[in-house]
Image: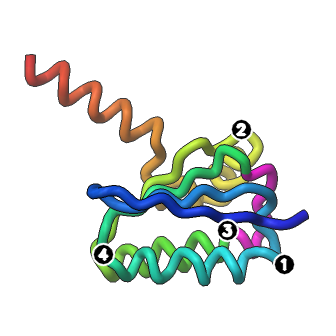
Amino acid sequence: MTLNVKERRNKTGTVLVATGEINSETSGSLLQALLPLVREGKPLKIDLTAVTYVSSAGLRTLLVVYREAQHEGVAVTLYGVSEEVRFVMSATGFLDFFETGEAAAAAAKARAKAAR
């Protein structure tokens, strides 16, 4: 299976939409797409809704992106993490590195409630 990536830019940052599998064959191209976006210094959202599988090579790629984002002071948020991918990332501890869209939405809801 292949991996397709598309990016959308707006005033608040960039969204990279990934479709397919992130494995040893595709992780290099994903890294090549993500690192320049991180280095731009704007918030980055990675939409994994259509990602069906993440191998150890894919996890390593996400770890490299996380480390670079920390170095650059860039927020990276994962969205649409499927149960299968979430399980792999959670079991390996990788999910703890990233903010997820669900967590971001819950935090925004809590802030709105506290502001009332």
Residue that label 2 marks: 83
Specify which label sits upstream in the sequence, 3 or 1: 1
| View extreme (top): residue | 116
Measure the C-alpha gap from mark 3 to mark 1: 13 Å
User: Residue 72 falls in which quadrant of the image?
Assistant: bottom left
- Up-down relation of residue 39 to residue 114 (above or below): below
Measure the C-alpha gap from mark 2 to mark 1: 23 Å
The quadrant the C terminus occupies is: top left
Residue 59: mark: 3
Q: Which residues are magenta?
A: 51-58
In percent of width and height, residue 67 lies at: 45, 78
Element assignment for label 4: loop
- Along the line of sight, which residue is nearer the eye, 65 or 94? 65
Element assignment for label 1: loop
User: Residue 74 falls in which quadrant of the image?
Assistant: bottom left
Residue 1 magenta: no
Give neighbour class at mark 1: few <14, some 14-19, many 20+ (Cα, 10 Å): some
Q: Amino acid at mark 4?
A: Gly
Q: Give the residue at x 9% y 23%.
A: 115
Q: Amino acid at mark 2?
A: Glu
Q: Amino acid at mark 3?
A: Leu
Q: Give the residue at x 19% y 30%.
A: 111
| View extreme (left): residue | 116
- Up-down relation of residue 61 to residue 14 (above or below): below
User: Residue 81 falls in which quadrant of the image?
Assistant: top right
